[in-house]
Image (cartoon, rainbow, N blue to C red):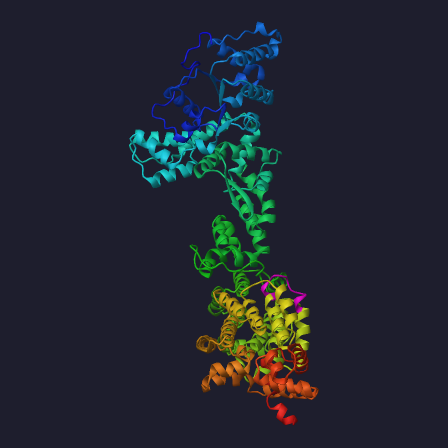
Amino acid sequence: MGGLGRRVRGALPRASRTAHIPARVLAALDARAPLTVLRGPRGYGKTTALVHWLTTREDDVPTIYVPLDAEARLAAGFWFALHDTLTDAGLGVDVAATGTVDAEHGEAERAAVLQALLQHEEPLRLVLDNFHEAGLLDGRNEVDEDLLELVRTSAALELVVATRALRSLETVGALSVDLIVVRPADLAMQPEDARALAERHGVAMTEDQADELVMELGGWPAAVRTCITAAAVGGHFATVEAATVDGYIETLLADLRSASLREFLMRTAVPDEFSAAAARAIVPNGTAIRELRNLRLGGLLRERETVDGLRYSYPPAIRDAIRRVTAEQYPEVEREVHIALMALAAQEEGPIGVLRHAVRAREWDTALRIIEEEWSSLVTRHPQSLIEIAVQFPHDVVASDPRLRVVRRHLPRMTGGSDGGPTWAPAGAGFVDAAVRQRWREMSETTDEILVLVQSGVAAIFAGENDAAAYAFERVRDHGLTHDDRTARLLGIAGLLTAKTIHGEADLALDLLEDPELADVVAGGEDDDVSQLVRVGGRIMRAIASIDAMRPDVHDAVEAIVEPARRDELWALAINARGMYASIYGSSEDQAKAIGQLRSALRHLEPGGIAESTVGTQLVELLVAGGMVDVAEQVLDRLAETFVSSSTRAYLLHFQGREQEAIDVATRGLTDPRMTARSRLLSELVIAAALYRLGQLTAARQRFSRAVRISHETGQRRPFAMVSSEVFDALAGHDPELLALRSLTLADGTRERRTTAASGVLETLSARELQVLLALRDQPGPAGVAEALGMSVNTAKTHLRHVYRKLGAANRDEAVMLSRGLVSERR
């Protein structure tokens, strides 16, 4: 090989004597693959690793080290540099022998280098440092193709390159030659590497300190090394120093030759993390995806999989440094990014995301408009975020806006404080629509803090947050009492009444109706806007509470309902109250009418909301009572699964004889703290009835006792009327107090009216159907009836369907209950 000896030829840069090179990197270099690529961004220790390896590892392979510089950005400059280094190393590169004279484009040097390396038959290692410079401005792919062909053809050559960028030499080379790639993740320091380096510098470091240092810096070797060196000099623990990282970032940004990559770094460091769509939105020059790919492959970006797709972020200390440097040099960038992200947030995050970016962009008017338009949604679904965002508004803006004042003064108490609290509502749980809010606005010339509390309280009611609603309305009532404000007093107590009624606390609701001022307005009173709203709402709440509690005056309370003209949520509650009444007290004609009204109401309600779920579940109960179980199941399947619907789902499953499923659904529903007392009582009764059907009498009575306790605590009675007499009698035993729960529900003649209606239908039964009905009293179902009467099971099922339809019974229990005493009367 001419004058080339075994030592490394080429000017090696000075490397730190205390540098720590991970064993995994040295092992990759020691493997002596035909092609080895070290790829990582600036400061990832590629050159340090090469120098350490070349100066500490002994082997018999002559090595030529070629550091490339800016002149190599042109392909001709690359071949000139390689030609000169090989010539100095004594390889014997002869330009004239190639016969090529195009010296202007470096063709002669290229041909001479390739020829010399191909003709060299002894082992040779060629190390190209800063390979990202090679042909950067022209001919990059051609340079890679020539070198790759050289490696494929020469059996003696080992090529090692260190680069900052992904090149075709790596991607195409993997298809045709043995290739080892040392990626950024391999070069990045791990906690054990940081501790080893600290030990070399005499710096004490615990495992936790090493973990934190590496995590904050993303394992960036140069930054980690500098922090440890500073600790050694200063005699303190190795921590991330902002000035040190800022210096690296300033150098990195200044060193970037690509303006688009520099812009990408600065803009994408503004959000905590970002998606590919966000990158396109905030870097509008069309290069976002390319730069995202380059930085990800370069190791400067972290990638994580989420339910919404891939998200990217910088290591914390790196991101903070980029933001600090950007804020100092380009202060307008952060505001521009947040403005760009507002449109994207409207699609991906909804109003809370738009609000968050509007505030960070200091677009106060836009932020206030979002808060006003989306108040109910924000205050129920995102209370904690709203609290955090409100702190970022200037004091003068907060002082001038009643909603922000409510957020700052009251929302932390309504949600349990800024350190945590309930998440108020599932998706689609906002109950207060634009029509209701418009009605509130019409009550007063201005929307003040009290009116905002009213809005918040009503929104909280129908998000299932009874305590939050109670807090809001108590503040409204207190204001009315303190300032002698009749409107506030009425809205406050009417709100408390609504909260307790919707939550199913019937006794408390009926007690609130005894308030003299409220009672006067509900009875008639004045005729102003507030009085009209309170009167309409108060009568609806009185009817619902009276039905729940099975009060003797329930019929008068339902008759007194004034149905609102506007078809909003208040109107839906009136329809729902009539449906509740019909399900217990109504004849089959009354129930059919209520079913039609509830179906109509569903068409006017927002899909997925709690209003729809409330009306829909009442419709299901009526359909079950009318024997239309299949239709009931279809209706329930179309409703969103919420804490409102879970007890009705369990009730339906019990009627279908799917006892264990009913128990499972009811048990899961009871874990939701937002569940109303009405639903909790029904769930406990379904579990008790299902356990009884499964033969677990002791367990059934225990659950029945829990239901009784809920009834005593809240005044709820109606769900007891939804349980079959057979099950109720078996679980209540001979306890007069428990039996009274059932008798209360039917003490006003309801049982007699329903039995009379069934009696008329009974006359239409054929002799055979009457036999089937009698046999059903002693048999559990079609199989037992068939055996008792000597018929096939299918025939028994047919007769039973006819019997159920004629009686209007949903199942065996109802048919048996309605027939008792009637058959002997017919005889």
Residue 653 appears anywhere in the view: yes
Residue drawn at point x = 53 percent, y = 54 percent: 401
Count of marks overlaid on the render: 0
Relative depth, front residue between 137 and 698: 698
Q: Say which quadrant the C terminus sits in.
A: bottom right
Q: Is residue 607 magenta?
A: yes
Relative depth, front residue between 44 and 603: 44
Q: Is residue 89 magenta?
A: no
Image position of 386 with respect to 815: above or below: above
x, y percent for residue 58: 38, 19
x, y percent for residue 734: 46, 87
Image position of 649 with respect to 799: above or below: above
x, y percent for residue 649: 57, 68
Residue 330 appears anywhere in the view: no
Residue situated furthest top in the rendering: 96
Place residue 818 in its image quadrant: bottom right
Magenta span of residues? 601-612
